[in-house]
Image (tube, grey):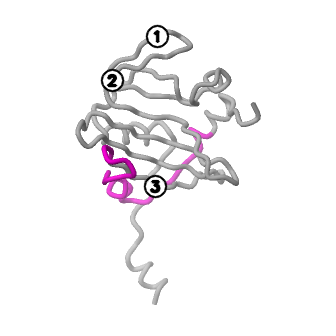
């Protein structure tokens, strides 16, 4: 399986420094998406080592506690997204290879093992009590995955650049 990312590859991508512009939360405020039952927004974020990432926020319209904050990696020279991690709202999840069950809010993590077994890359999950809503899930993802927020641009510098 040539397309499998190793656990080391995954760890390097998760920890690669990523910088987002101030106001990223507003740009990720969910709104109606492609599906009728779900609100969704995303922003693309460059990594410091040249990788391209997508930060995705999703929330069910009828059941707001069904949400996901996702960090995906865009495979080079393609539009294929590889989900590195996903912070979900409270529900029951079964880790098929381990036979364990996770309840409540939980973090899905991409693993080489699950890819080789033929499951989705981020099929493994662990309980995570650091958040209870989508905003908290985004903050936790931001903290865990090497994000820093750039300060807003100086209005005077912008005015000088475009005058």
Q: CA distance from mark 1 to mark 2?
A: 14 Å
Q: CA distance from mark 3 to mark 2?
A: 26 Å
Residue sitting at x 58%, y 25%? 119
Direction front: furthest residue: 36
Task: Identify the residue under disc 1.
Answer: 100
Foreground pick, 26 / 57: 57
On-image quarter of the N terminus:
top right
Task: Identify the residue under disc 2.
Answer: 91
Q: Position of residue 85 (x, y in %)?
A: 50, 34
Queried whether the magenta region covers residue 98, the answer comes back as: no
Q: Secondary structure at mark 1?
A: strand
Question: In the shown orientation, is residue 92 left or right of residue 77?
Answer: left
Residue sitting at x 23%, y 39%? 62
Foreground pick, 36 / 92: 36
Q: Earlier in the sequence, mark 3 or mark 2?
A: 3
Disc number placed over residue 54 in the picture, else none: none
- Callout in the foreground (3, 2): 2
- Quadrant in which residue 133 is drawn: top left
Foreground pick, 159 / 94: 94
**Mark 1 burial class by Cα count in 10 Å: few <14, some 14-19, many 20+:** few
Task: Identify the residue under disc 3.
Answer: 43
Q: Position of residue 71 (x, y in %)?
A: 49, 42
On-image quarter of the C terminus:
bottom left
Q: Which residues are magenta?
A: 13-38
Residue sitting at x 58%, y 30%? 121
- Quadrant in which residue 3 is drawn: top right
């Amino acid at each position: 399986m040539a397309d499998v990312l190793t656990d080391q590859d995954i760890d390097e991508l998760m920890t690669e420094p990523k910088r987002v512009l101030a106001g990223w939360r507003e740009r990720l405020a969910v709104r109606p998406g492609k599906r009728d039952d779900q609100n969704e927004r995303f922003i693309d974020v460059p990594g410091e080592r040249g990788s391209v990432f997508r930060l995705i926020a999703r929330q069910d319209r009828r059941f707001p506690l069904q949400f996901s904050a996702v960090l995906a990696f865009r495979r080079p020279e393609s539009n294929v997204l590889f989900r590195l991690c996903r912070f979900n709202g409270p529900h029951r999840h079964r880790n098929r290879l381990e036979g364990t069950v996770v309840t409540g809010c939980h973090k899905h993590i991409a693993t080489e093992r699950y890819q080789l077994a033929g499951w989705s890359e981020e099929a493994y999950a662990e309980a995570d009590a650091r958040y209870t809503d989508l905003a908290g899930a985004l903050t936790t993802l931001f903290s865990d995955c090497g994000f820093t927020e750039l300060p807003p641009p100086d209005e005077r510098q912008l005015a000088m650049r475009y005058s």
